Each structure stands twice: as structure tokens, then as C-alpha cells.
Amino acid sequence: MTTHNKFLDSLCWLVVVLGVVGLLFLRFHRAGDEAVSNFPTRTLTIICPYAAGGGTDLFARGLARAAEKELGQTITVNNVTGGAGAIGHAAGIIAPPDGYTVTAVTFELVSLPLQGLAPFTHEDFELLMRVNMDPGALAVQADFPADTLEEFIAWAHENRSVQIANSGPGSSFHLASARMSEVLDLPVSHIPFNGASPAITALVGGHVDAVVVGPGEMQVQVEAGNLKVLAVMGEERLELFPDFPTFRELGYDVVMGTWRGLAVPKGIPPEIQERLTEAFLAAMHSEEFRTFARRGGLNLAFTDAEAFRQSVQEQSEQIDALMERLELK
């Protein structure tokens, strides 16, 4: 065979190989396009980093039910617990980046890494949206000798000490209570409990002077006339509790609390992220979910992906400095 013929044969084989590769590329590219354009085609999962029956679990299940109608697929909630939320958050980060796994992320996405309790940060997720923000609320017994925040501050200084219960060391409401104490210059002893419920019980029983937890968590005791709320740490008054003044409107820059949102693994196509955001936003605004939120004392506070990322970053910097001062790091 001449050199010329060998060259032609090689050229023909090259054309065939390139043609096959091209067809395969087009096939898989088309399949990828179809996967994106037809998304979703099967069951989705929301990872909840906390146990069944808790606030985040109920939040995830309520949102899942409403979003099923928007996406046309079943959404299951998988409780991946342990490490104060670290294991569930980590599972969400390493999930396949196909859009079928969404994680219910919480404030602990900020606090755990700062305490060295998790090997990840919020930057390892693609944040989709914040759904709710529960600000801290300062409450006292109904017969406490102070009916306003100013009277409470005066009482604390007069007695040279005030015992304030919170939901646990390093928790969002422990940090909220500490921030409040700094701004108000209060002589405080922070009393941690294993969750908001026992902290509230301690206040009702008269074992502490005050408590800082979420307003929804103390709603029953307030409505029963056992407790009164002096102020909340939100940016504005809450729709669910319009009579509770904010610290900010009273002249004190205290805006802190806990939040919940949705995130997906890095690498998901933008079109799928957009589809998920549209569906969960519609679910959040549905009458079904809004009724669920009202009954559960859940303060809805949507922010889009960009605003969510910015607020989490700013909060991370603020909490980092606060933890240093509290010697929690």
C-alpha cells in the first residue's frame, strides 16, 4: 500500500471516529438538555438536618407539601440527624448536583463552622432562598415589675444582675441574648437550657428573670397570660405579633435570631436552580403554606439567592466576632 493510500485510509478513519464522537456528543448533550428542560421527572428529596417533629422538620414538610403541586412530583423529607445539624448539612453538600436533593439549611450553617464543629461553610452550598427568619424575643413573667424595655433595663441595673435563659450554649438565641446584653449594657448571667421549651418553662416557674427565644415558641404562654414580650429583635414588627415593638424602633440596634432557607449542591445547572426557586417561592406564597406558617408562629421572610448569600456572609462575620468575645471558639 502506497504512502498516499495509507494517508487516505487514516484520513477516512479519522473522519469516522470524529463523526462517531460528534454523534455521541450530540446525543448526550441533547439528553442533558432534555433532563434540564423536563425537570423534574421523578421524586425529589429535602434533607432536614434535625429530628422528625422539630421546628425545621415541620417547616420542611409543610413546604414540601405545597411545592409538590408546583413541581408535579412527590417530595420526601429525609431526616439526616447528628452533630447538631452538621451531618445533615454535609449530606446536602455532597448530594448529586442534579436538582433532586434540596437541603433545609439553618442558622447552624453559620454557627457550627465558626465553633470548629463542621468542616464546611455556607460557601460550599448554592443558596437558593431564605424562607423565614425568627427573631429573638425578650420575655418576662406577666407580673414582672417592668412593662417596657426601658423599665426592664432600669430594673436590671437597680438589681445589678439579671438571669436570662436561652436555648443552649452557642445557640442562635444565646448569641442573640449576648448581643442584646452588649448593646443594652446589661449586667447579665446567661442561663443555657437544652432547647427553647425548657428555657420557657424555667421562666414560667420563676427560676430565671427573663428568656430570649423565638416569639412563636412562647406564643402559647403569652396567649395564656403567663408571659409578656417586651421587644423583638426583628428588622420590623412581625405580622404574626404586631403589638410587639422591635429593639430598633426603641432605639437599640439589635437585630438577631434564627433563620431557615433552601440550598442545593454546587454545580447544578442554572435553569434547574431557577425552576426550583420559582416552585418553592410559589409554594411559600400559597395559602396552604401561609396558613401553616401562621398556625406554627413561623415568620415568613423571603430573600432571593443573592440577598441570602450577602446576609449570611454578614451574619457570619458578626457572629464570629461575638463568639470571640463570649469565648465560644
Image: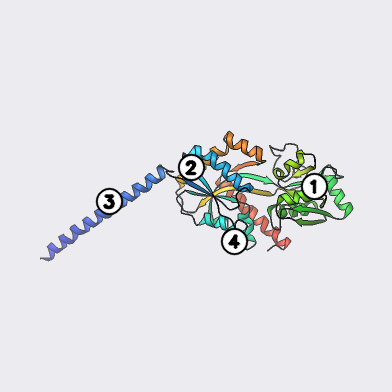
Q: Which mark is on residue 74?
A: 2
Query: SS class of the residue under badge 1?
Result: helix
Q: CA distance from mark 2 to mark 1?
A: 42 Å
- Amino acid under disc 1: Val
Q: Nearer the viewer, mark 4 or mark 3?
A: 4
Let me know if residue 270 appears in the view: yes
Is residue 179 toward the left or the right of residue 131 in the image? right
Mark drawn on residue 23: 3
Q: Earlier in the sequence, mark 2 or mark 3?
A: 3
State the residue lying farthest toward the right: 158
Distance in Å between CA atoms under marks 2 and 3: 35 Å
Q: CA distance from mark 1 to mark 3?
A: 72 Å
List x then y, in percent, for residue 236. Answer: 70, 41
**Neighbour tally class for label 4: few under 14, some 14-19, many 20 plus, Cα within 10 Å:** many
Q: Which residue is labeled 1 in the image?
A: 204
Judging by the rendered image, the residue that carries numbered circle 4 is 118
Q: Nearer the viewer, residue 142 or 158?
A: 142
Q: Residues within 10 Å of mark 1 (few under 14, many from 20)?
A: some
Q: Are circles 4 and 3 on residues that touch, CB within 8 Å?
A: no
Local packing at callout 3 (Cα closer than 10 Å; few below 14, some 14-19, many 20+) is few
**Of pointers 4 and 2, the one earlier in the residue sequence:** 2
Q: What amino acid is at disc 4?
A: Ala
Residue 114 lies left or right of residue 209; in this view the side is left
Query: Residue 76: x percent and y percent?
Result: 51, 46
* Residue at the spot 80% in from the left edge and 47% down from the top edge: 204
Q: Earlier in the sequence, mark 1 or mark 3?
A: 3
Residue type (three-letter) at the residue carrying disc 2: Thr
